[in-house]
Image (cartoon, grey):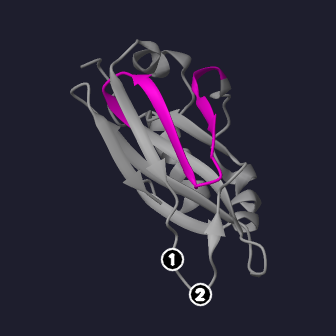
Amino acid sequence: MAAQPPPGDTNFHAADFAWSQAPGKNTLAGSLVHTGPVRYSCAGQTVVLTPETPWARRRMQVLYQSDQRAALPADDVRSRQNQAPPGDSNPYVKRVGCDAADRFSFTGLPDGAWYVVTLAKPVAGQTGPSLALMRRVVTRGGKVTAFEF
């Protein structure tokens, strides 16, 4: 398994993301099954996969008030942007689309921990705020890791 940086310094360091750029044999297969009085969908939305680093962990804690899992009004998450540690992880994140069945997958991933983030909107005929969804997932052993939001 590629070495991941230890906890500690939460400043942005491009080198902390190096492990995530290695080719791998893991797949993350996700789906949205958000339950509650309002039915949500991620169809047509971009799903972002960010490698876990000390900086990314701290950023998730600030934005989502958790470094494990969250489903919060998107406006609330956006309102905390200026409090999150600065840095540009765009060169290291992966993006895929969420399909009409609320499913998505990332392939060729190395072993490691990742943050999956997407936007979910109420389906037609439903009302409610758009939700920012975040979940920490771990890949290892060249396997498919299935998870749900």
Q: Distance from label 2 to label 1 (Cα)? A: 7 Å
Decide which of 117, 103 is in the foreground and name it: 103
Q: Is there any visible trace of residue 122 in the rendered image?
A: yes
Q: Amino acid at mark 2?
A: Pro
What residue is at 46 percent from the left and 53 percent from the top?
135
What residue is at 48 percent from the left and 32 percent from the top?
106
Instruction: Tell whether position 99 is magenta.
Output: yes
Q: Which residue is mark 2?
A: 37
Q: Which residue is mark 1?
A: 35
For the N terminus, give its image quadrant: top left
Using a 10 Å C-alpha cutoff, classify the residue at mark 2 as few (fewer than 14 neighbours), some (14 to 19) or many (20 or more): few
Q: Give the residues in magenta.
A: 91-113
Decide which of 88, 94 is in the foreground and name it: 94
Residue 126 position within the rendered picture, expressed as x and y whole percent measured from the top left = 74, 81
Q: Amino acid at mark 1?
A: Thr
Using a 10 Å C-alpha cutoff, classify the residue at mark 1 as few (fewer than 14 neighbours), some (14 to 19) or many (20 or more): few
Decide which of 134, 37 is in the foreground and name it: 37
Horizontal side of 35 relative to 90 (left or right) equals left
